[in-house]
Image (cartoon, rainbow, N blue to C red):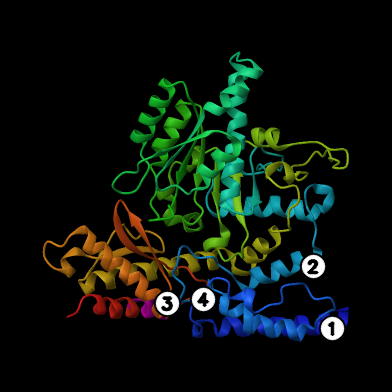
Amino acid sequence: MDVNEFRKRGKEMIDTIADYYETLDQRPPKSTVNPGYLYKLVPHEAPEEPETFDAIKDDIESKIMPGMTHWQSGNFFGWYPSNSSFPGILGDMYSSMFNIVGFNWICSPAATELETVVMDWLAKLIGLDKRFLSIKEDGTEGIGGGVIQGSASEAQIVAMIAAREKMTALLLSRGVGAAEAEQLQSKFVAYISDQTHSATQKGAKIIGCKARVINSDLDFKLTKKALDAAVREDKAAGLVPFFVCGTFGTTNTAAIDELIGIAEVASAENMWFHVDAAYAGSALTCPEFRPLAEGIECADSFNFNPHKWMLTNFDCSALWVADSTHLVNALSIHREYLPRVKGDTAFVKDYRDWQLPLGRRFRALKLWFVMRMYGASGIRQHIRAHVSQAQWLEEQLLADGRFEIVTPVVFGLVVFRIKPQALGSNVSTEIVNEANVELVKQIQEDNRVFLVGTKLKGCDVVRAAIGSAFGTKDNVERLLSVITELTSKIIPA
């Protein structure tokens, strides 16, 4: 493909992408293929001779498209949103054009410096404490700062590595020998609740520490009381508490942990306090949600995913640290072929020392595009529209009389179930669970909309996550229609 054909095909691709988004709601949101379908449709070896763009494009529609679940559809309400936007796509196109491997400033100064700038923009947009900024008000370098990771899982593992470094340094400062401090790392304990993302447990396996899962309360929150009790018990057993993750908007229910109380325990025990706001962090662009996040100003690290609910194409996970010293000390490995530039400004950062991989894409471009082309007002409008739609759905489900809302609707997530009274008097928990599992099954098989269920303390419930960048209230009305229609098949009049 030469530049002239690329110019032609590139224009065709833009039209294809635009057509896809224009007709997205006409497609069933969930793929219905069976495992192994694609292996039967494609050759089992790479082609020896070049194939045409037209042939590949035809295969996209006939072979790939049937196996796609359409996350950008307005009828997709599963898990959490994975926002795409046209500005994000355009930013990604520029990133692909440059195709840099931006592990340090020399690789492409613009890539490093733009990331520093937009991460400070984003920190200010969501109201983060000044400790998390790379650039202080006087234009000099701060000790904190932000970096774009691939996912919240990566961000959390990076934070755990920094936490291990911090605790090890603390032990050394207290006179513990280097060999003993290294041996003690296997006794380091990270604390999470049974609602925390699984990344902490995976991170514990990777870095060789322990993870303690604490039962959440009746509101599915990690409490100060429960954390404090677990820490005291582990210290009595000779273990070393070093890390705790508080969540602002859990995966199952969008619950908010007792962040202030967790911060108090973390401070008293010299533990690293990480806040995972992967989903709900986008809501902090709206000032009315910031009181719910009181306590994050005390965190050592904070993370949220603009690629979930802030219009920025995957992957773009924003991580900030209040003090980058321990992070850089833990992950910095020098090689002669990776020269460092010593500068007097805050902009000469080697972001390879802030992440697990060496190489990194120019992700800041798409975030820059989104923040400029939507503006803060457009981003807030996007968030508020989904919250309003979620509240409307909550009202309609309650008005129907057959449903109950399981957890408060705060953001764009509605967690509900067919209530026991709708199934008869004195029905068992098993029967109620079976009815709700059946509802999710029928909705997925019907395939006009897509959502998923989950289990909360033994109860099967239904989750509807409203957040598509291309969805409208019409899609939510369709969701309600499908829910009520299929519920009537489960509960005959």
In front here: 55 or 236? 55
- CB within 8 Å, label 4 to label 1: no
Which secondary structure lies at badge 4? loop
Question: Looking at the picture, which amino acid does disc 1 mark?
Answer: Glu
Residue 473 in the figure: left or right of residue 297: left
Foreground: disc 3 or disc 2: 3
Residue 136 in the figure: left or right of residue 462: right
Query: What numbered label is drawn on residue 97?
Result: 2
Q: Where does the magenta region start and end?
A: 472-480
Query: What numbered label is drawn on residue 449?
Result: 3
**Residue 408 in sight in this render:** yes
Q: Residue furthest top?
A: 175
Foreground: disc 3 or disc 4: 4
Which secondary structure lies at badge 2? helix
Q: Residues within 10 Å of mark 2 (few under 14, many from 20)?
A: few
Give the residue pinned by disc 1. 5
Coordinates of residue 90 in the picture (x, y in percent): 69, 71
Rendered-image quadrant of the C terminus: bottom left
Rendered-image quadrant of the N terminus: bottom right
Question: Looking at the picture, which amino acid does disc 3 mark?
Answer: Val
For marks 4 and 2, give the CA distance. Answer: 31 Å
Name the N-terminal-most of marks 4 and 2. 4
For marks 1 and 2, give the CA distance. Answer: 16 Å
